[in-house]
Amino acid sequence: MERQEILEVVRTHLVEELDVEPDEVVETTNFREDLEADSLDLYTLLQELEDRFGMKLTDQQAAEIETVGQAIDAVEKYATGDSEQGP
Amino acid sequence: MTTVAVDAGGADAGPREVAAGAIDAARQGIKVKLFGSAEEIGPVGEGIEVIDAPVSIAKVADPVAAVREQPDASIVQAARSVASGEADALVSGGSTGAVLAAGVLHIRRQRGVHRPALAILVPIPGAPVLLLDVGASSESRPERLVQHAHIGAAFSEVVLGIERPRVALLSNGEEASRGTPEVIAAHQILSAGTGIDFVGNVEGLGIATGEADVVVTDGFTGNVALKLMEGVSSAVIGAVRAAAASDARAAAGALLMKPALSGLRDQLDPEQHGGAYLLGLRSVVIVPHGRFGRRGIAKAIELAASASDADVAGRTHSALEAAGALRSSE
């Protein structure tokens, strides 16, 4: 998957969940400082990416993600492409 | 046979009282995995497996960080047992923040659900009302209110046995134009026909007057409303008791009324309903009040088992999907 496509998935999620404007979500956006996201918001995003792109992050890997760009890096590095089905 | 993971850490009454509730539930044929200090839990009967987990998470400012940093904590291990399929449902009387964090991080939200909701049965005599969200999330968004309306309706139907429950939004007026922008927007969506019996807005008073079976609000308002109801209820009950003991005639009258009041007391007893329900996760999570004793804990475990057997999570998701109420990016 292209980096821009992953960014769109992240952007769509954040716009819906945090009620921010699409142009606020770019690769340099810091979740806590720029979007006022809390821990639960961030982990909810990472779980969305895990389900969508078929990856599983360790707690340590998740804790190191602070920006949109780093989240995209994680998808590019760990995704298997097997998305999860079901409720 | 349904297995319920029970977190024995964090409850005010202590692990031994939680274990006593687990023993009572196990006698009903429910398998229990009990997570807590084995030394404090003590001997248990058949049907209960004790997993020694002496670390518990207290009420903290950042429960998500606490859950991440303490993987051996009783609530974390209990939640992971549900996530792995070793258990079917979770019961925890510890810090609600820790239960929410452990639930979201390990059991996870259902696909397409924005945020889980904490729901509670307000013990209105003769007609208890499901109120949600009472504190899982403090923010208000129209799409969350709409989802919680569906989630509450599904739970009410599947677990409480109410056929086509009436669902209302909590507002400061009955008119569709009354309320915050989020409530007004949610009202418009629900009024357009979403497969549930949406009866419009109710004011705070309407929670207790039987106008709806499910009342939906944001977590901040719901938590304030819940604590207010608990506080007023406690004050009134205390005043009635004081009046009944004020002189000999009053005491005699109270004695005569006792048989009639005992049934009412059972209806008002929060332990009868098992506690609060964390809805919108992939498995059932019940949060008994930290002050519950063995009776309330046993009730919570029984409720968790029956809700899991009835596939509340799956049926709720199906209801959301049929109504087109899941997140658009799912």
Image: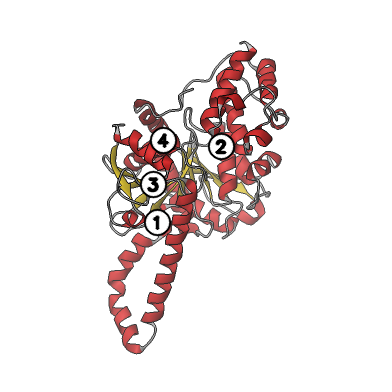
Type of the residue with mark 3:
Gly
Measured as percent of width and height from the top left, residue B4 is found at 50, 42
The mark closer to the camera, 2 or 1, is 2
Q: Which residue is mark 2?
A: B104
Type of the residue with mark 2:
Val
Query: Residue under mark 2: which chain is it in?
Result: B
> Of callouts 2 and 3, which one flags the residue occurring earlier in the amino acid sequence?
2
A3 relative to B236 in the view: left or right: right
> Of callouts 2 and 4, which one flags the residue occurring earlier in the amino acid sequence?
2
> Of callouts 2 and 1, which one flags the residue occurring earlier in the amino acid sequence?
2
Neighbour tally class for label 1: few under 14, some 14-19, many 20 plus, Cα within 10 Å: some
Please tell me which residue is depicted at 55% across the width and 34% down the height of the picture: A18
Q: CA distance from mark 2 to mark 4?
A: 17 Å
Measured as percent of width and height from the top left, residue B314 is found at 41, 31
- Which is more toward the observer, B23 or B186? B186
Q: Secondary structure at mark 4?
A: helix
Q: Secondary structure at mark 3?
A: loop
Residue B147's label in the rendered image is 4
